[in-house]
Image (cartoon, rainbow, N blue to C red):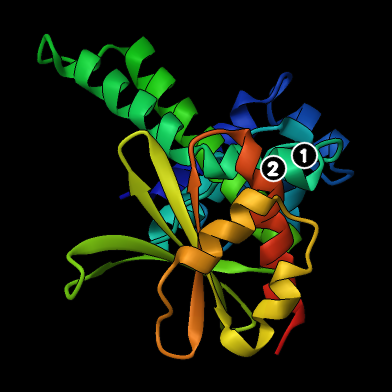
Amino acid sequence: MITPLEKAIYETAHGYKGGVPALAKAMNTYGGTLQNKCDPRMEGHRLNMFEALSMMLITGDHRILYAMAQETGHACQVLGDFENCDDMELLDLALNLNAKRGELDQEIRDALADRRITHAEKLAIRERIQAIIRALLELFERNEMTHEWRYYRDGKAWLCKVQKKKRTIVWMSAWKGFMKATVYVPLKHMDGVYALPISDETKERFRRTKDVGQSKPCLFEVRNQKVLKDLDTVMQFKIRTK
């Protein structure tokens, strides 16, 4: 029985323009050797990792990668090109996740309205999901942060914990129409927060917020781009302080 990986290798090689001979030439290898390595029936011949990578780079076909991920219980995600996108633009993308998620939910509801999902609807849903994931991955990677969504039974809610080197920097939660982002700052550092170049309105909101133990919850309700600069400033302050 042919495995998904063997099928992916075979189809990648034979789907290349000119077939295996043209691909072998582009890879600077012998056609007969590559033919055998891509034939599932030739059990004594197998591609090595570098050859598989070369095939994907030359053909632009990544089905080998997807097959390997599937067989190891993982998934692949195409990363976006954010080279000319600054941190604030990325933060805007990530923290508007709730709005995008609402649009995604609506697209899924529309698609299910007639109890069938067309190919076009499936592609639209997948693209929106991938766009959200790409923005989040890039934002967290730039700040060397990791994130994890988890359901907390005590609060009966899904929360996202964003960490940098195992230190929690931001707690995020999704609400109808907006997102909440909370940065818990030790009370001993709050004078430093009030000295930051953030709006007076933001500072006053922090002062009115009830302390939690020895920390002040610096809460942001992200409904538009206006609060993003203050959030980023406080987040970076939390990263710098011990």
Number of other residues with Cα within 10 Å of mark 2, as a class: few under 14, some 14 to 19, many 20 or more = some
Residue 40 in sight here: no
**Cβ–Cβ under 8 Å for marks 1 and 2:** yes
Residue 29 in sight here: yes
Q: Is residue 106 above or below residue 51?
A: above
Q: Residue at horizontal 31%, vertical 19%?
A: 107
Find residue 38 and report its horizontal and vertical position in percent.
59, 45
Nearer-N-terminus badge (1/2): 1
User: Disc 2 residue type?
Assistant: Leu
The one nearer the camera, 1 or 70, is 70
The one nearer the camera, 118 or 162, is 162
Work out how far the residue at label 1 is from the one at label 2, CA to CA, in angstroms. Answer: 8 Å
Q: What is the quadrant of the C terminus in the image?
A: bottom right
Point out which mark residue 208 bears: none
Seen in the image, is 133 located left or right of residue 56?
Answer: left
User: Disc 1 residue type?
Assistant: Phe
